[in-house]
Structures are given as structure tokens and as C-alpha cells.
Amino acid sequence: MNLFPPANYRGHIDVVRDGQVLGWAQDGSQPRRRLVVEIYAGGVLLGAVRADRFRKDLAAAGIGDGKAAFSFALPSPAPDRATLTARVAGTHYWLVDEGGAGKSGDHGLVETIPPGWSHAIADETAFRREQQALAHTWTFLGLARDLQKDGDWFRASLATREVFVQRFGDELRGFENICPHRSYPLRQGDRGNGPIVCGFHHWQFNRDGLAIGIPNCRQLYGKLPHELGARLAPIEVATCGALIFGRFPSEHAGESLQDFLAEGFPILEALSRMPEKPQIVREKIDANWKLYVHITLDDYHAPYIHASTARSSGGHLDPREITYRQFGAHSCFLMTSDTRAFDRMVAGCRDGSYGASHYSIFQIFPSLVVSLSCSDNDNWHCCFQQFIPQAHDRSLLRAFVYPSPLSAYRSRYARVTRLLTDPIRNRLALLVFRRISREDRDACERLQEIHRTGTVPQLGGLERRIAWFEKTYRDAMNVDR
């Protein structure tokens, strides 16, 4: 599994004129194979055309023998140009359309970020202030599959504070993991099932976090338990597909999870439909969480840090072959030059029609990173990574790796043999992830060792998403909470 696996298919809609859609398409693994291209208008199939015409410019560019062009006659009246799209028939590969309406970050020089960006990396006090601010930001806590039965609970970390989420019937509730009596931790395992009972003095709490059972309450406090008014500190909980997010309440934090995730909501919802139990990775990192987030936003380091797992051709990514996009507080990298790819993915995940055709990675502020990568042929894997802050120089990586739940076109042979090959493929995908993760961890720990505040990174076009992240981070720090 390559870090940036090359696509087999490539092609463009070059121009639409005189009622014709002109372009080309080719299978890079079989250059002389003639592909069939489907033409759509507003998502409705207009027809198909064989890409087998000869063009001198294609031959000169080394695109097979040059016989990969097509010309498709549009119906009359011609549909709106902005609605036209094309894909290789029988696949999820959509042709790049330079005339499409999409927005992507340019790849030139990037504005600098202020010297104060790294205070919380070097200073424990600044780190604590940072975490107090981020406590009111929607943060990934865990998976709904761990809370299937009434009474199921799991423990998590929210801005360095221990919390737990529990199922009560058809509702999820979350609380800080501290008894209001003497601050004893209520939940001491990673997950379990049962009522909320403090192990120190056996206080018991209901679904609203109210103390309803206090031994010898009248004799010791002169009141009944409900009159004492002792409560757990609540957290707000919301879900996106199989993902559970939480935040501590604040009068300034009124944005719903769906609004916070913006166009990322249907993507995360679709990718989180895990077809099987994920493989889980937990690793300690002797580095600040932001350094690890930065390295996942850095598309410049792969040929060096990941020399064995980056593109087989080596060298840097060609900025013309990738697309960046911001959406709300978040950003993504798509291994395609098609500026409409992100919009197409959002729409396809929303209606269930999307199938993977290129490597994609999504950074969900503040510390969740989601990737979709090709393991081999038409088999894809998802990985959810979370970088959990523990101290200014210490973090925890938690990751979930599993086969992609998105639809895929597979040959009959591939469908039959998957029962035998999937266990091997899953194991290999985990090994590759661990290797990439170890290489990133080593780099981050070296950065942490020599880090000095006041340094200003010299960011280039392949590090643009770091600047985007830091702008969002500064906005979060400046909110009056």
C-alpha cells in the first residue's frame, strides 16, 4: 500500500464547444486499452462514447499511442456547461474538468504564521490555557459501536480532562469523570456496562448526573440525596454516523456538530460505517499534539521521511496533480487535479453513490485526521487517527484501521477471493500504517527536543494546510470563553 498510490485512470474534459464535449481518457496500467466514457448533465446520464480517437498532442505527451480522445455530441438544447461531468464507465473515476466550478488552494508561497504559534508546545502554562479554550470545541471521543447496549459506557479524554459517555436507552449522555463529592474517578476502565456508582463512597448518579443514592445521606448531611443537589459536570454529546463527539458547554459554543463539520459531515458519516471491527492502534508520543497534526498537513516531507512508502516514482508531489480545500474549520488533500472532486465526494457520500478513486486525507479540527487510501487494485482502507493531548510535550495516538465501506467496482474473481485475501490485506494495511506512524512520530519527537518558541516556519505551497490550521487555531484561542 503506497502512501500516495497512483491512479490507473487519467483523463480530462478539455473543452465544450459547438455542441460537443471533447476530451480524453486512458488506463495507465493498460495504455492501449480503449476506455468508454459516460457523459452526465446534473448527475443524469446523457450517453457514452469510446475514447479511441487519435490526437497528436496526446501521443507527443506519451499518453499511450495517442488513441485516447473522444468527442461526444450533446443533445439539443445543450445542457448548462457547469452541470457537465464525465467518468470512465464501470468505475468511480471522474475525468478532470478544468472548466468546472470548484475551489482549491493555489500552490504558491504561503503567508507566514505568527511566532506565538508554538507557545503551548514549549510551555506547560500556555498548554493549559490552550486546552481550556479547546474544551469547548467539538472533539472526537469514540465509536458508537462500543455503546450498543443500555448501560454501556466508554472513557475518553476531552482537552486533557477525563470524561465518559454512556448509553441510557436510546440516548447518549456524557459527563466529566469526577465524583462531585471528593473528585474520585467514577470510571476506571476503558469501557464497561453498569450504573454510575463512585467506588470511593458509593454515591450513585442517574442519567441526568444527579446524585440519587448517597449512603447515610440524612444522618450525614441532614438532607435527602435529591435535596443535596450534587451533580456530575455534563458534556454535550452528538454523533456523526458511527462517530461520537463531545465538548464542555459554554455560552459561546452554540454551533451544532453538523454545522461545525460543514461539508465534512456526510463524508465522515459515510466513511465511519465500519464493515467490520477495526484494528486499533495506541501509541505514546513524546511530542506535542500540534506537531503531529502539522506533519499530517505537510505534503512536502513524504519523499524523505516516508521514502519506502511514498510514491514509487519518488520525488515531490506535483502541485498540479493535487487539490486542497478548506471547509469550515477543516481542510482536505485530494490526490487529483480535478477541482470538482471534493464537491463530487460530498454529494456522493450524501446519496450513497460515491466510490473511491484517489487518495484523500481530511483534517478535522482540532485533532482528528481521516484518510482513505488504496491497499491494492480496487481495495481501499480507511484510517481514523486522533492525537490526544496529555502535556505540552506528550500525546497519545489512537487510530482505527479498517476496509473502506464505500462501494467499489470489483471483478467477479476479486469478489469471490476477497474472503481469503481480506485478512491478509487488512494485516498488511495495518503494518504499513504502523510504519508510517512510527516515521512521523520519530520526526515529531526530534522537533519537540529542539523546539524553541519564536521560530517562524518557512511554509511552501505543499504546506499550505498548516497555515490554514494555524489560522483556525488562533481563532479558537481568541474566542471569549
Image: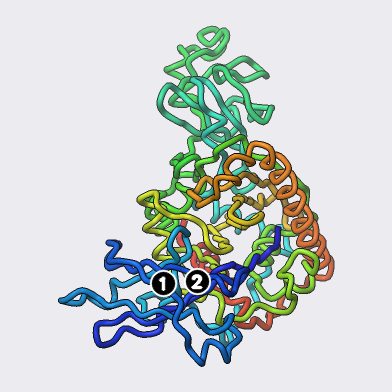
Q: Residue at x 49, y 12 (%)?
A: 222
The percent position of residue 207, horizontal first and vertical second, equals 45, 23
Residue plotted at (37% across, 54% down)? 259
Q: Can you give x and y, in whole percent of width and height, for residue 10 in the image?
A: 53, 73
Residue assigned mark 2: 34
Q: Amino acid at mark 2?
A: Arg
Residue found farthest to the left: 77
Residue type of the residue flagged with mark 1: Arg
Q: Residue placed at 66% from the left, 54% from the top?
A: 375
Q: Is residue 480 left or right of residue 300?
A: left
Quadrant housing the N terminus:
bottom right
Tell me the tag on residue 432. none
Q: Is residue 91 above or below residue 233?
A: below
Q: CA distance from mark 2 to mark 1?
A: 7 Å
Quickly name the residue at label 1. 50
Q: Crowding near pointer 2: few (<14 within 10 Å), some, many (20+)?
A: some
| Tag 2 near tag 1, CB within 8 Å | yes
Q: Is residue 372 above or below residue 303?
A: above
Q: Earlier in the sequence, mark 2 or mark 1?
A: 2
Q: What number of labels is visible?
A: 2
Q: Is residue 251 visible?
A: no
Q: Nearer the viewer, residue 391 or 418?
A: 418
Quadrant hosting residue 216: top right
Work out whether residue 463 or residue 211 is closer to the camera in this orientation and state it. Answer: 463
Q: Position of residue 187 (x, y in %)?
A: 64, 27
